[in-house]
Image (tube, rainbow, N blue to C red):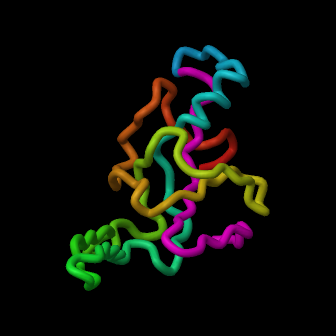
Amino acid sequence: MSDIGIYPSGNRIVIKPDDVEEVTDGGIIIAKQIAESHQHAQTTGILISVGPDAWRHVTKERSRLIDGQMKLVERETTGYSEPFAKVGDRVAFAQHGGIQLEGSDGETYRIMNDEDLTARVSDKVSFTGLQSRKRVGLK
C-alpha cells in the first residue's frame, strides 16, 4: 500500500470509506451533491492504519477524601481484550463519524477513535440507500 501521509496517534485509526454508486443499477445518474452527501454519511470502509494505543485497556481511577484519607471509590476500565480488527478488514463505524481528511494520494479518509468501530463486515453488507461500489475504472 502506498503512503497516504496520515499517521494516527494514540487510539486513533484511519479508515477509507467505501465509495457510493454514481449511477444506479437502472442507469440513473446520481446528482453530485446527493452522492457527496451519501459519501459523507457512509458507514463502512477499509481499515487502513492503526495508532500505537488502539485496542488497549485504559483504566481510570477516582479517589475521594474520606475520613482525612484519599480512598479509591471507583475504577473504570475501557478498551478491548484483543485487537478488534486488522489493517485491510472491512469495518462499520458511526455515521458521520471521525474527521475527514484528504490523503497525499488525493483519496478521502477518516480518522476516528478505535471505539467508534461497531463491527467487522463482509463485502456484501451495505448500510446506505446508495450501494457501495468500486470507482469507475478500478477493478
Does the stretch in magenta take in 16? yes
Residue at 51% in and 37% down: 132
Image quadrant in which the N terminus is located? bottom right
* Residue depicted at 24% across the width and 73% down the height: 75
Up the image or down, 95 lies above or below 15; here it is: above
Residue drawn at (26%, 85%) of the image = 69
Query: Where residue 28 sits: x, y (%)?
Result: 62, 14
- Whether residue 52 is in magenta: the answer is no
Position of 26 relative to 48 (above/below): above
Q: Does residue 94 appear to the left or right of 71 in the view shown? A: right
Range drawn in magenta: 1-24
Horizontally, residue 90 falls left or right of residue 21, namely left
Q: Quadrant location of residue 116?
A: bottom left
Is residue 56 shown left or right of residue 112? left
Q: Residue at x 64, y 54 (%)?
A: 109
Q: Is residue 50 above or below residue 44?
A: below
> Considering depth in this image, is 76 or 86 the residue closer to the camera?
76
The image shows residue 126 at horizontal and vertical percentages of 40, 36
Q: Main secondary structure of the magenta part?
A: loop
Query: Looking at the rendering, which quadrant does residue 56 occupy?
Result: bottom left
